[in-house]
Image (cartoon, rainbow, N blue to C red):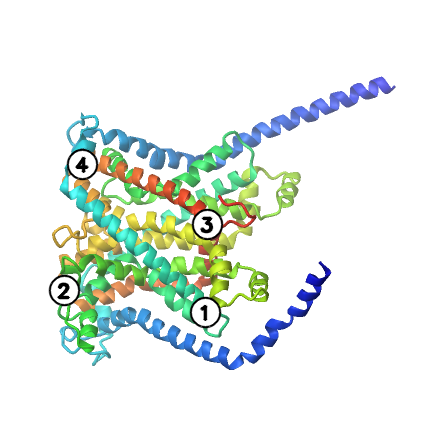
Amino acid sequence: MSQEIAGRAVTVPRPRVVRRSAQPQVRVKSLILYALLILLSLLYLLPLYWMISTSLKLTGSEMVIPPQWIPAPIVWSNYADVFTQVPLLLYIRNSVVIALTATLFGVLTASLAGYGFARLQFPGRNFFFGCCIASLMLPEIVTLIPEFILFRRIGWVNSFWPLIVPWSLAGSAFAVFLFRQYCLTIPLELDEAARVDGAGTFRIWWAIILPLSKAVLATLAILSFTHHWNEFLRPLIYLGRPELRTLAIGLRAFRGEYQLAWNYMMAVALIMLIPILVLFFLAQRQFVQGIVMTGIKG
Amino acid sequence: MSITNAAQLAGRSSVVALRRSRFRRRQELEGLLCILPWLIGFLCFKFGPMVASLVIGMTQWDALQPPRWVGLENFQTMFSDPRWHNALYNTAYLSFLSVPAQLAVAFLFALMLNEKLRAMPLFRTIFYLPSQTPLVATAFLWNWIYHPDFGLANVLLSAVGLPTQDWLFDLDLAKPSLILITLWSGIGVPMIIFLAGLQGVPQSLYDAASIDGAGAIARFRHVTLPMVSPVIFFNLIIGIIASFQGFFTIVFLTTGGGPVYATLIYVVYIYFRAFQDFKMGYAAALAWVLLLIIMAMTAIQFLLARRWVYYEGGERT
């Protein structure tokens, strides 16, 4: 036993010795790693570069062999032209209206439910929370057909309601889950102190819990906004009338109905990508952490 | 004196108990109120439709005329439906190849990013960026990249002297072309999750392994892999379930299920049946079979996980 301990005491500094002697080797290793990473980065950026460069080409010059790697001339006006060629502004407006409304109500109800699951004792709490987790696994396509029949019966097809109402109530089981997990980390003493001061359950949610969870709320809001901005299948089913189209399904019409040239298509695709990128860079840390939380605790 | 005191105390405690039970009852009510909006949504848009879907699956219904009850006929029709076989095969092909391939690439990237070097946040952002591109934009971008005459893919092939391809229009190449798209757009999220998993492995374990004489490969095999196996498992389940639906946008906007049904996947087939042929009954039955398949696969993955997933605390579950 004591021999073992002695042996361990001797071996502890060894890695440091090894590392020092291997320094040139480590440098070579990190050089190779850098080279590999740069190569892979170029590979992953290439499609995006291709999208940007195509979007800036003169109509007609996007279809030449060999291709222009750098557009000559650079036609910035493509981005202005697409707004006159197709009802882009209308589609953006529709997308924004749907995404903002659904996000606002969705985050509110999810935070309220998450707070309830985390803080309050009521019959069936664990059962309902289990239902919430289980619904994470439910594929959207399974509920889509009855939902469509229901919305057609009550006349909501060709309106924004089917895209807003279900999400506002129970769109994101994940949001409920995440908010509950976060609530559990807020000290219970805060609630109790507020209760002593005469605040009710809902007052505590609104005035104590929500202000303390701005970071989570922002993460949920961004995830939700992105989801609606990108959503394709349900707008495709519910928004048949052209003036109701969102950007996601409008993009499809540009190719089919308007026969838009590829440079314009890429410009529109980039216009669709830009808000998401802005959101991503604004909240990169929270975003990544949010995803990590799902991954590790799921 | 002492008796009255005791009686007073008893009276007071019963008042406290009453007040406490009233408080508890109120709290129960308020708790239910808190989850009420979510619960209504869950019943109306998740649980209700799930059950309704099974019932509709046992009817013939074009959603205009009243439905006609046909029992299990839809499920029987399915087995002799060649398109259903196409859809099953294509979905299995795409999911079982693309998800493990994505995870392998994502894991390799995470391993590289886990090295403590400068500029890692930049590389991480670059690899993550494609996953943030809206799928609709991704689909159109790759339509353009795969353009048989002027696409980037063929430009690169001919630059290195290889014959150009028809990519999405080629019967044999259509599915691999789709998988290539997901290797670009699908690795961001699992990569970040892997990276977090790798960073969660305690350095002490690596040190201990080094002391015992383990080289880099042995450390990877006996420390890294067991420690991140739950994360791999999680990514696998989520990835496969997500791939059943995630392919919809890409397939719908690139190949539309063609050429000659080579990329007709399950969800696209349900969409065509339900919203083009208006066979709501048959489509609902198709959807339910998909649900059963997903549930079975999740269960199988949980069973398999016992053999190779290591959870901290020593227990294998």
Whether label 3 touches label 2, CB < 8 Å:
no
User: Residue B290 sits in which quadrant?
Assistant: top left
**Residue tagged 2:** B166
Query: Residue B177 placed where, x, y %?
Result: 22, 61
Q: What's the CA distance linking mark 1 and mark 2?
A: 37 Å
- Amino acid at circle 1: Pro
Above or below: residue B7 compared with residue A274: above
Nearest to viewer (mark 4 / mark 1): 4
**Residue tagged 1:** B121
- Amino acid at circle 4: Phe
Q: A156 and A179: which one is in front?
A: A179
Residue B132 shows in this picture: no
Query: Residue B181 placed where, x, y %?
Result: 26, 61
Looking at the image, tell me whether mark 1 or mark 3 is earlier in sequence order: 1
Residue count near mark 4 (Cα–Cα under 10 Å), binned few <14, some 14–19, many ≥20: few
Q: Residue at x 44, y 79 (%)?
A: A31
Query: Residue B232 placed where, x, y %?
Result: 42, 54
User: Which secondary structure, mark 1?
Assistant: helix
**Residue tagged 4:** B79
User: Which secondary structure, mark 4?
Assistant: helix
Q: What's the CA distance linking mark 4 and mark 3?
A: 36 Å
Whether label 2 touches label 4, CB < 8 Å:
no
User: Residue A166 sits in which quadrant?
Assistant: top left
Q: What's the CA distance linking mark 1 and mark 3?
A: 29 Å
**Residue tagged 3:** B309
Q: Residue at x 31, y 63 (%)?
A: B184
Nearest to viewer (mark 3 / mark 2): 3
Q: Chain of mark 1?
A: B
User: Which secondary structure, mark 2?
Assistant: loop
Q: What's the CA distance linking mark 3 and mark 2?
A: 41 Å
